[in-house]
Amino acid sequence: MTWRLLFVAVLAVVAGCASTGDGDPRDPWEPVNRKIYKFNDTLDAYVARPVATGYQKVVPGEIRERVRNFFGNIGDVFIGVNNFLQGKFEDGVSDWARFAFNSTIGLFGIHAVATDMGYEKHNEDFGQTFGRWGAGPGPYLILPVLGSSTLRDGLGWGVDFFTDPLNETEPFAVHWGLVTMRLVQTRADLLDASRILEEAALDKYTFQRDAYLQRRRNLIYDGRPPREKEPEDESDKAEKGR
Amino acid sequence: MRATRLRRVASTALAAIVLAAVPLARAQDLPPDQLVKGVTLEVIDLIAKDKEIKAGNRTKLIQLIDAKVLPHFNFSAMTALAMGQSWHKANAEQKKRLTEEFRSLLVRTYASALAAYAEQKFDFRPLRAKPTDTDVTVQVRVLQPGAQPVPIDYSMEKTSSGWKVYDVMVGGVSLVANYRTEFNNVVRESGIDGLIKNLSTKNRSLEGAGLEKK
């Protein structure tokens, strides 16, 4: 319950920040976002990254794969729901078939047997569903702890959070154990990507933002986004606006 | 001109020996999807066999990419695309420097990505293009256990010296487009020379970090 309140509070605070009107039109809250980004980055450098690195070092790859599969399997339930909500019934059925096979033959999901049976893993969430329904991303948003988002994806994340099957786990210790485990696994899977980001970016904040926005757009269209308008036009506008 | 041809002949010969496989056709003659597949598999194979690279020798990995992968990239086209409007404001010398610096930044990024993905399986998608097309997208998917496959799309253009890559999209993120905002921001603040300096500083710092690790 406290988490839910916190989430609403955070959205309200961020949404209340006035637009500055200067800089990237997709990121009117950039000054605040940068502050939260810096906070997240510090938290990551001192807590999340060391823990994830340690996990990757200590736990053998095969076990990590089982852990990834286990949480991936739980996720497939609502990936299916989101596919249904987006009218992609075939994909939704496939996701639920994945869940059925992996949960049974795959021993509670630790073996992703359905992949070899031809049921491919999908990537869906409520942010993507809202996007599919026609919602634009809205302003770019850095959520505390969670990182890159947009107004639409932040709201979507809220729904993801409320519908997370792990919410039903009890007792308290088991619930938090599972939630922590999943966070560590997720961060460990991103270690390579975050190192590449460090190397590739001149300004990490901008690079990550643009990558996030491109990635989300691509995901909403399931890898086949329509061509965007010529980027030259945008830089022209930016020039004139100054 | 002769030197590049010699080098190409030498590398082809070397590849044939190392792979002990079907003799490779000259890169100019290969259709784009086969070129991507051939180069990817060759490089992955070379990495797998090289103990030093597997142990984390970045310099050697970068040399390998330099020799095998980079000849198939059109870096001046990539730099021009990443610069957008600002490209036209640069003079010939600045364009040359920008391309060089962007090239070495991309090589490092590519090396890190390759090192991360080298153990995964690749799915080379059949090319969906007409034989007369001169601008195509070659699709590769990296299959990772327990996760959605990562699509890698190579945008390629036919040139007189074979098919050349001018953009890479990883998971829907275009590398060239992703640098555009960054580059334009720097150019707006400190001009073309500022961007050259910025890129060069970044590259030097990465070189320094690479040396420390050894």
Image: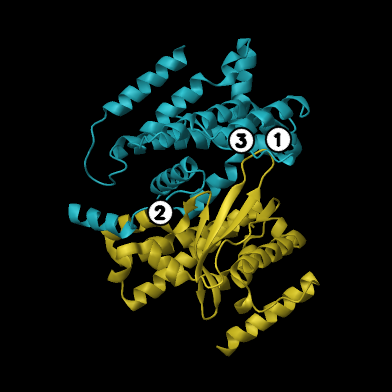
Chain colours: A cyan, B yellow
Task: Say which element carries label 3.
Answer: helix
Q: Chain of mark 1?
A: A
Tell me which chain the residue with mark 2 is part of.
Answer: A
Q: Indicate the amino acid at tag 2.
A: Arg
The residue nearer to you, when weighing A65 against B201, is A65
Residue A147 in percent (x, y) is at 45, 35
Please tell me the numbered disc located at residue A159: none
Circle 1 residue: A64
Mark 1, mark 2: which one is toward the viewer?
A: 2
Front residue of B34 and B200? B34
Is disc 2 on the same chain as disc 1?
yes
Q: Specify which label sits upstream in the sequence, 1 or 2.
A: 1
Q: Which mark is residue A52?
A: 3
Q: Is residue A140 left or right of residue B103?
A: left
Looking at the rendered structure, the kind of residue marked 1 is Arg
Q: Check disc 3 and give the amino acid type.
A: Ala
Question: Disc 1 on helix, strand or loop?
Answer: helix
Query: Which image quarter: residue A120?
Result: top right
**C-alpha distance separating marks 3 and 1:** 11 Å
Give whichever of discs 2 and 3 has the lower sequence position: 3
| A58 left or right of B174 in image | right
Is B66 rendered above or below residue A130? below
A193 up-or-down from A64: above or below: below
Across and down, in percent, residue A136 comes to: 35, 37
Are discs 3 and 1 located on one and the same chain?
A: yes
